[in-house]
Image (spheres, coloured by chain):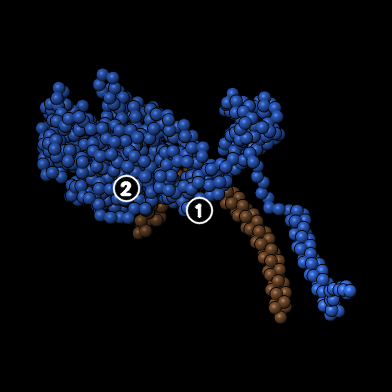
Chain colours: A brown, B blue
Amino acid sequence: MHRTVNWILMLLTLASAVALYVIKYDTRRLEARVLAQERTLEKLEIDVAVFEAERAYLARPERLEPLARERGLGPITTRQYLRVDADVQGAPARAAR
Amino acid sequence: MSAAVVIRSVEPEGSRQASRMSAERIRLRTLLTLGCVMACFVAIGGQLVRLAMRAGPDIKASLAEPLGRSWSRPDIVDRNGRLLATDIAVPSLYADPLLVLDLDEAVEKLASVLTGLDTAELRRSLADKSKRFVWIARGLSPRQAQRVHELGIPGLAFRSELKRAYPQGSLAGHLIGAVNVDNKGLAGIERTLDETGKVEPVQGTMRSPKPPLRLSLDIGVQHALAEELKRAVSHYAATAAAGLVLDARSGEIVGAVSLPESDPARPADWLDTTRRDRLSNGVYELGSIFKTITVAMALETGAATLDRLYDVRQGIAAGPYTIKDPYPQGRPLSVREIFLHSSNVGAGMLALEAGAERQRAFLGRLGLLEPMHTEAGPVAPPLLPKTWGKAETVTIGYGHGLSVAPLQFAVATAALLNGGEKITATVLAGERERVPQQRVVSSATSAKLREIMRLNVTHAAGTGRRAEVDGYRIGGKTGTAEMPGRGGYQEKAVISSFLGAFPMDAPRYVTLVLLFEPHSGEGAGDRITAGVNAAPTTARIVERIAPVLGVLPRLVETHLGDGGTFDALRQAQ
C-alpha cells in the first residue's frame, strides 16, 4: 500500500516539476513579449512626442503670423465688434475699413 | 576416532527464490530511475535545442555600453496647452577605443561630419585604450547620426537618450530656462522642475509619466509682445527692451519678454550678460512711473487730495542738489496735474509731506523692499539707499535712489490698481487658490489712481496720450529715467517706460514696457521720452493682445452719453 502511495506521489512530483518547468518558460516568453511591447510603446511614445513637437514647431505664432497676414488676416480691430442691437446695414463696410 | 563435522550452510529453496526476485526488482528500479533521469536530460536537451532555434527577444548589450543616466522631464505647456518644451529621443555617439582600428582616420572622418568637434581632445580620448567607453557627441540630429553611420568606422556606436526640445524657439526662453546635456535643469522653470522633484532619472528613453506643467503664459500674447518690442527696438534704435503683461487680480504672468532673447536650446546664452532677463534679473531706477506709488501713498495717507494745490514753481532741495521740473508749468499744480505733467518737484513734495518713515513703510507694504521669488527663480533684490534721509525721500518720490526689478515694480502697482489687494506673481496657471490677500490701499485710493492714470492717456496734456487705443480704456504713466554712468546720470542714455493697465474702469491686466537707451524715431523727433516711444509701443501691444485675452472694447460710437466714468472723462475734454 505504502509503495503504491509512494509511486503516486513520485509521479505527481515529477508531473509538478514538468508543469512548473513549462510554466516557467511560458512566463519567460510572456515576459519577453511584455518587454518587447513596452519597448514598442516607448518608441511610439517617443514618435508621438516628436510629432507633437513638430506640430508645435509648425504652429508657432512666428511662422503663422506672416502666412495669416499674406491672406489679409490680422488681429481683430475694435471696428469689427458690433452691438447686437446696432444697425448692421453698414457693418461689412465698416469692418472692412 | 573423531568424526569430521562438515558444517554447510543450508539455504532453503524459498529464500533463494526470494533473493533472485529482489535482485530483479532492484535492477528494474535502477533501470526505471535511470530511464527517468535520462528522460529529464532528454527533455532539458530538447528544450535547449528549442530555445536555441527560436529567435530570442531583440535585446543586444555590449560590455562597453555605459550605464548612462538621463533625466525624464514633464512637458511644459502654455495656459492653453500649447507645447513649449518636451523630451524627445536623440542618438548620441560613443566609442570603444579598443575597437577603433585607425585612430587618425576615425578622428579625421568624424571631424568632417560633426562640426565643432574638439579633435585634439577626441584623439587623446580615443588613444587611451584602457577605457572602454568615450562619449564623442551627444544629442545628434537623425541626419548627423546617419552621416556618421555611413562613415562605417569600427568601434563607434549609438545609444538613444532623452533631449529637451523647445518647439517655440526663444519665445519665453527667459522663463523656461535651460537644461544641461544630461537633461538636468539649470535655470528658470526647468530648474524648478528639478527642485520640486518632478524629474526622474531614467536609463534609455522612457518619457516622464507626469502631467505637463501648465504655465500662465499665453503664447499668442507672448508673441505679440515680443514682435512689438522688436519693432520698437528697431524703430527707436534701442539697445534692449522688456515687456510684461500681468493679470492684475491673480498675479499670473501672461506675457514676459526681455530682448535680446535667450534661447533655451543654447544654455550658453545664460552666461551672456547682454541676454539677461531684464524683467527679473536686473534692478533699475525706473523714474517717473514710480510717481504712481508716490501719489497713491499721498492719497492713502490722507495728506493730499486730487485737487489739492502744491506750489511747484520753486525747486526742491535734495542734499547738494536742487530738484527742478524739466518742463515747468509756471503755476501751482494740483495732485492730478502733478501726475499728468509728471512733475518731479510735485512728487518730491508729496513724498516729503508723507515723510521718510511713512514712505518706507508704504513701499514695504507693497513688497518693494524685500527680495521676491517666482516659480522661475529668485528676482534680483531691490537696491536700497544706505541712508533714508530727506534727499532720498524726495528722489525716491520721483523714481530715483531706489532700484527695483521691473517685475517686482509691476506686481506692486497691480495691487494699487486692482482695488487695493496685494498680489503674488506666479508663472503657473490656475495653481494658486484665490484667497483674500493683504489690503495695501483702500478701494477709494485705487479708484482715484485709476482715474488719473486714465486721464493721463485721454487728456491733451497727458504724457501718455499716445498710448490710447480705441475702446480698450488704457490708463498709464510714463517714465524716462536717466541711467547712471561715469560722472553721474547720463542725459542721453535713458530707460523709457510705460506702466499701463486696461480696461481702466476695472483693470484686468497691467502692462509694463521698457526701452533701454532709445534714440529718436519716426514720430518722435529728437525726443527720447517715454511719451513718444514706450507709450505708443504699449498702444500697439494692447491693440494686439486685448482680443487674444478676451477683453472686449467699449463701443464708444454706440455708447456716447452712457460711457463709463473713464470714457465720459474723455468726451468731456
x 14%, y 22%: residue: B320
Task: Give coordinates of residue B105: x percent, y percent.
Answer: 69, 26
Q: Secondary structure at mark 2?
A: loop
Q: Which residue is mark 1?
A: B209
- Mark 2 — on which chain does it sit? B
Q: Secondary structure at mark 1?
A: loop
Q: CA distance from mark 1 to mark 2?
A: 29 Å
Task: Give coordinates of residue B418: x percent, y percent.
Answer: 26, 49
Task: Give coordinates of residue B90: x percent, y percent.
Answer: 58, 41
x 59%, y 38%: residue: B92
The answer to whether dots 1 and 2 both sit on one chain is yes
Vertical order, B209 against B357 (above or below): below
Left or right of residue B495: residue B105: right
Left or right of residue B198: residue B303: left
Judging depth in this view, the residue of A87 and B565 nearest the camera is B565
Judging depth in this view, the residue of A93 and A54 nearest the camera is A54
Left or right of residue A13: residue B82: left
Task: Give coordinates of residue B4: x percent, y percent.
Answer: 88, 73
Judging depth in this view, the residue of B280 and B285 nearest the camera is B280
Q: Which residue is mark 2?
A: B251
Q: Earlier in the sequence, mark 1 or mark 2?
A: 1
Camera sees residue B68 = yes
Q: The N terminus of chain B is located in which quarter?
A: bottom right
x 48%, y 44%: residue: B85
x 62%, y 28%: residue: B128
- Mark 1 — on which chain does it sit? B
Residue type, numbered disc 1: Pro
Residue type, numbered disc 2: Gly
**Residue found at the far front of this picture:** B1
